[in-house]
Image (tube, rainbow, N blue to C red):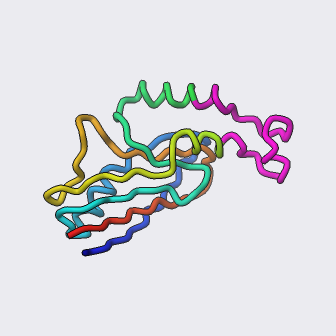
Amino acid sequence: MRSFRKEIALHLPQRMDFRNITPEVEAAVRESGVREGLCLVNSMHITSSVFINDDEPGLHEDYKRWLEQLAPYDPSPERYHHNRTGEDNGDAHHKRQVMGREVVVAITAGRLDFGPWEQIFYGEFDGRRTKRVLIKILGE
């Protein structure tokens, strides 16, 4: 079995935003040479996410509004105990928990084996600094 590892660095300046990383993952699958296997894609930070959904701007705006309603940004230590540590990103940890850490996609005939409209996204919930996403590919 072949194993391939690649990291991609992302810097989204907005506090909360989404970026389609499907092209980078597809390039890593091609680079790996794996024809049949699995591709894991995960955020290496606790205030960001990787998820699969449709690349539709209205949906992304809905996610942002929904997440902000669930865990509104509030840097004060009154709302989030985490902010008592000197941080201001308690909300970002909650948003990441809801959106998830990683995705796994099958590789078939050397390509990501998606359903209709599926794409891989990076979700940022505490922007302003560079973060990493791990792509790990296993297979033959």
Tell me the quarter of the image containing the C terminus: bottom left
Tell me the quarter of the image containing the N terminus: bottom left
Q: How many marks?
A: 0
Is residue 79 in the magenta section?
yes
Residue 110 vs residue 39: left or right?
A: left
Residue name at image x 43 percent, y 44 percent:
51
The percent coordinates of residue 33 (x first, y second) are: 20, 69
Q: Quadrant of residue 75?
A: top right
Residue name at image x 36 percent, y 30 percent:
56
Depth check: 58 or 110 in front? Answer: 110
**Boundaries of the magenta span:** 67-91
Q: Quadrant of residue 78?
A: top right
Q: Quadrant of residue 114?
A: top left
Residue 25 vs residue 113: left or right?
A: right
Residue name at image x 50 percent, y 30 percent:
63
Is residue 101 in the magenta section?
no
The percent coordinates of residue 132 (x first, y second) are: 51, 61
Residue name at image x 19 percent, y 62 percent:
36
Q: Residue furthest left?
A: 109
The percent coordinates of residue 5 (x first, y second) are: 37, 70
